[in-house]
Amino acid sequence: MLARMAHKPLFQGLTATQRSAVAAITAQRHVSAGDAIVRETEYGDTLYVVDQGRVSVSCLRDGQQQTLAHISAAPPSGPCPDGDFFGDMCLLDLEPRCASVTAETECTLWEINRDD
């Protein structure tokens, strides 16, 4: 995990020592395609980094679930230009999640909990 962390946009500004400290509090989670990772309106305390796979971000608008974005793991050749993480707002505020995130493919996620 630590070696791959240097290629993730979220961690690129950190020193090796700082990345090591973050890795120490990061859990790895595997999810299957179709699994809900977070749900709109639920409270959360975890930021997720997509290490492998692809997820979709959606929210309820006018009674319909609408896809807002797709988030994929950064390719091995370099960082993902759109970023590869979600759930960051729950670390900054105590508001409910503003969107749902569902695995489109089998995924490996890194979880960083606010309390850690």
Image: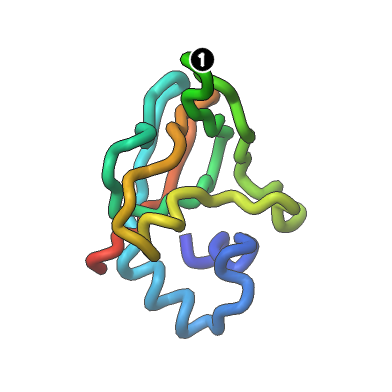
Percent across and percent down for residue 48 are 43, 50
Q: Secondary structure at mark 1?
A: strand
- Given the image, on which type of amino acid does mark 1 rest? Gln
Q: Who's the residue at 66% across and 49% down the image?
A: 74
Left or right: where does residue 31 sit relative to residue 63?
Answer: left
Whether residue 37 is situated above or below residue 2 in the rendered picture: above
Q: Who's the residue at 75% across and 53% down the image?
A: 81
Q: Who's the residue at 39% across and 65% down the image?
A: 92
The image shows a total of numbered marks equal to: 1
Can residue 76 be seen?
no
Whether residue 113 is situated above or below residue 11 in the rendered picture: above
What residue is pinned by disc 1? 64
Percent across and percent down for residue 16 are 53, 81
- Residue at the outermost left position: 115
Viewer-proximal residue among 64 and 105:
64
Quadrant of the image occupied by residue 97: top left
Percent across and percent down for residue 66 are 57, 22
Whether residue 3 is situated above or below residue 81 in the rendered picture: below
- Check disc 1: other Cα within 10 Å, few if <14, some if 14-19, many if 20+: few
Q: Who's the residue at 59% across and 25% down the image?
A: 67
